Amino acid sequence: MKPHVCILLGTFNGGQYLRQQLESFVAQTGVNWSLRVSDDGSDDDSRDIIASFIKAHPDRDIRLYEGPKQGSAANFLSLLGQSDLPARAWVALSDQDDVWLPNRLEHAVQVMMAQMKTGGGQGCVYASRTILTNADLALRGPSCRHPKAPDFGNALVQNVLAGNTMVLDPAAAALLQATAPAAMRAGVPHHDWWIYLLLSGAGAVMINDDRPGLYYRQHKKNHLGANRGLGKAWSRFAMIWDRRYADWIGRNLAALTEMSDLLTPENRARATLFSAWLSRRHSCPGSGAGFGGPETMGPKLGDLGQIGVWRQSRAGNLMLHLAAAAGRL
């Protein structure tokens, strides 16, 4: 029997590209699929396109919801938290302006099943590289490759799993469904970063596949876009300097505190040390409250490597330490 994959699609004024993405769902091989769409207040033809798609595919379970109108992260978290998701289904996240390769879902599920046979963990999360294009789908090349395997210590300060490529096994999907309300209350800044953080912390199998599964359009309306080039480097610097990056980390940790019992003992201890380290950056030594527990002395300032918190590149780790030294973390 083919596995059932429930596709979660977030839309907001995406009518210009939406039809091509929907047709790429129809072309998927090797799986059965259903579709949940959360429209976050579009005032273009996005909702009409979805309605026409539902009418054209009466044999499919396709449902349209009103989004929370609190931004992209909240829109996807609201989808993940829906009570009527198909039981025991796999879940795939989708942006509105990509185009999937025909075997994207089939390949992802096969890779996940093979990986899960060799390792335990609380579920499995799959992501992959993408094929970057311009707005007209002219090829620009593959997305960047992250050299190191996904890990909770990396997830505390960096997201390397592209949300538009994510596929979750039923166990991972169920965990996210149960915890989505807490993540929304904390205002986590990016749903894909949150998925990476929570699931890696819980001990799930994490896969970041080198094989691309979709065409990723780069255009003026991208919420974030591909993470490369001088413009993106400057944007990252600006986010550090105005402390948006520090705020993001703080909100992620606040949400994680509500569900610290879901973390493995090792990762709970690492989050505790990192939380205490951050607290001491903004107060006198020894005043840092532990992560969901008593005060933790932990490593001295600057010893992020000792805590086990790191970014994927040397430049990224240098940036992290400089941000701390400048009081921007």
Image (cartoon, grey):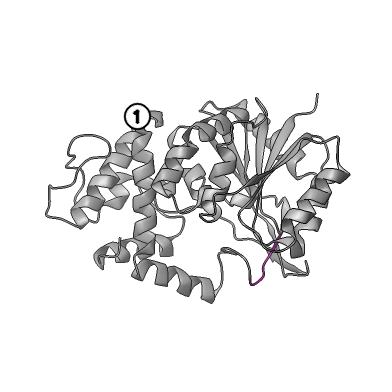
199 or 309: which is nearer to us?
199
Quadrant of the rendered structure where residue 19 is? bottom right
Is residue 102 among the parts visible in the rendering?
Answer: no
Is residue 110 rendered to the left or right of residue 198? right
Residue under the point 42% across and 39% down: 182
Residue 240 position within the rendered picture, expressed as x and y whole percent measured from the top left:
37, 66
Residue 209 position within the rendered picture, expressed as x and y whole percent measured from the top left:
64, 46
Amino acid type indicated by mark 1: Pro
Residue under the point 79% across and 46% down: 25
Quadrant of the rendered structure where residue 217 is? bottom right
229 or 102: which is nearer to us?
102
Quadrant of the rendered structure where residue 205 is? top right
Q: Give the range drawn in magenta.
A: 216-220
Q: Indicate whether 65 appears above or below 212.
A: above
Quarter of the picture containing the C terminus is: bottom left
Residue 96 position within the rendered picture, expressed as x and y whole percent measured from the top left:
69, 56
Quarter of the picture containing the N terminus is: top right
191 or 141: which is nearer to us?
191
Which residue position is annotated with label 1?
265
